[in-house]
Amino acid sequence: MKPLLMLVCTLLLTVLCVRALAIDSEAEFKDPAKQARYEHLIHEFRCLVCQDETIADSNADLAGQFRRQVHDMVAAGKTNAEIRAYMVDRYGDFILYKPPVQESTWLLWFGPFLFLLIGAGIAFGAIRRRNKMMQRSAEENRAQQ
């Protein structure tokens, strides 16, 4: 049992160490307002490699490049809107971790609810059919007695 416990602990520590390597390599801004803007912005963009992580949380090389781009644009004095527009123009709405609700993203936003409704309809229909079959069976049993 001890070797298994040691293996689990080793794997857990390895995972934690890998997360520690995700620390941003960009130098912090001396201006706290710029640093706060930078931190906020890197949490708004999706890593195109990991897809379910922001560029702030991702270890991917591409996420590091995106962080550098955002850092450089903040340092150059670009506004948040200009930085978002640049990233969207270059990489599409998918780069936004929370894409806007628009015609091209309707399925992304409303698809899960649509599938939930379809699944609930199928389950409701199956339950009704089962109940009708059980009622018929009970009626037939009463008729036979």
Image (cartoon, rainbow, N blue to C red):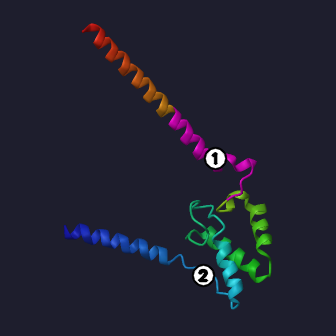
Residue 45 drawn at (x, y percent): 66, 66
Residue 76 drawn at (x, y percent): 79, 82
Left or right of 85, for residue 132:
left
Q: Confirm whether the magenta stretch covers residue 115.
A: yes
Check disc 1 and report its element: helix, strand or loop.
helix
Residue 35 drawn at (x, y percent): 67, 84
Query: Which residues are the magenta region?
Result: 99-121
Q: How many marks?
A: 2
Left or right of 50, for residue 40:
right
Residue placed farthest to the left in the image?
Answer: 1
Q: Quadrant of residue 70?
A: bottom right
Q: Residue at x 75, y 47 (%)?
A: 103
Under mark 1, the amino acid is Phe
Foreground of the two, 5 or 127: 127
The Cα–Cα distance between marks 2 and 1, rounded to whole angstroms, is 37 Å
Q: Residue at x 60, y 70 (%)?
A: 61
Q: Quadrant of residue 133?
A: top left
Foreground of the two, 66 or 98: 98
Q: Quadrant of residue 99?
A: bottom right
Foreground of the two, 62 or 141: 141
Instruction: Give the number of the mark in front: 2 or 1.
Output: 1
Q: Main secondary structure of the magenta part?
A: helix
Quadrant in the picture for the N terminus: bottom left
Q: Is residue 25 above or below residue 144?
A: below
Quadrant in the picture for the C terminus: top left
Under mark 2, the amino acid is Ser
Which residue was labeled with disc 2? 25
Discs 2, 1 touching: Cβ within 8 Å: no
Indicate which disc, 2 or 1, sits on the residue closer to the N terminus.
Answer: 2
Which residue was labeled with disc 1? 110
Q: Residue at x 64, y 86 (%)?
A: 27
